[in-house]
Image: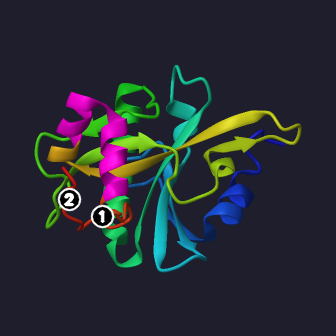
Amino acid sequence: MSRFSGFPAHVEKYVGTVRGADSRDTGGRERAYHLVYCDHRSGPYVSVLTSGLREHTAGAPLPQEVLCTVHADQEIHGRHLTAVVAELLTESNSRVGYGALIMNDRLLLPETEIAGALAAPHPYLADEFDVLLDEDGGPVLQLITLLPVTRGESQLVARYGRDALYDRWEQRNVDLTDIRRPSAA
């Protein structure tokens, strides 16, 4: 039995129903992971997560998968953000840690102010979601949530640290699942 065999049940326990997945084949090119779609029980949200990235996150204390949770009608944007970051990680054979900014030099998602992501624990799910445990209770997989950020928000993090951005989001009651939200910077 694989040490990751509990991954699907873990996702369904904390996120919701696994609706389906994209194949690794992306029009003639084999991707290093699947993109999995989960519908939340708590409302009209979808999480798009990788499955297979864990085989390519060199140097991480734990193998990793990444995900992005968005409003259900913004699924295509969550898919794009997750895929862009996953491709960056597989191509560079690297990992991402909490607090890391992954930014693009221009807007990443059309019709939005989003230019990248902040790697973080999931802001709306239980803390237990962020790490998959094996049968003996040992950690085997880390789940990194990609919080969409604007260029201004990334500059705020660069100047004052990520806590300044978290404080701003909290003060303004920002919905971090809304890709079309205005910048909080």
Is 184 on the left or on the right of 23, as rendered? left
Task: Say which amino acid is labelled 2.
Answer: Leu
At which x and y percent is residue 102?
Answer: 29, 37
Q: Secondary structure at mark 2?
A: loop
At which x and y percent is residue 51?
Answer: 56, 49
Q: Residues within 10 Å of mark 1 (few under 14, many from 20)?
A: many
Find disc 2 in the rendering and name its residue: 109
- Disc 1, disc 2: CB below 8 Å? yes
Query: Is residue 163 highlighted in magenta?
Result: yes
In this orientation, which residue lies closer to the viewer: 68 or 176? 176
Task: Say which amino acid is labelled 1.
Answer: His
At which x and y percent is residue 178?
Answer: 32, 67
Q: Secondary structure at mark 1?
A: helix
Outermost residue, front side = 171
Magenta stretch? 154-171
Is 13 placed above or below 151 here? below
Q: Quadrant of residue 171?
A: bottom left
At which x and y percent is residue 55?
Answer: 57, 34
At 49% from the left edge and 63% from the top edge, which residue is drawn?
47
Label number found at residue 77: 1
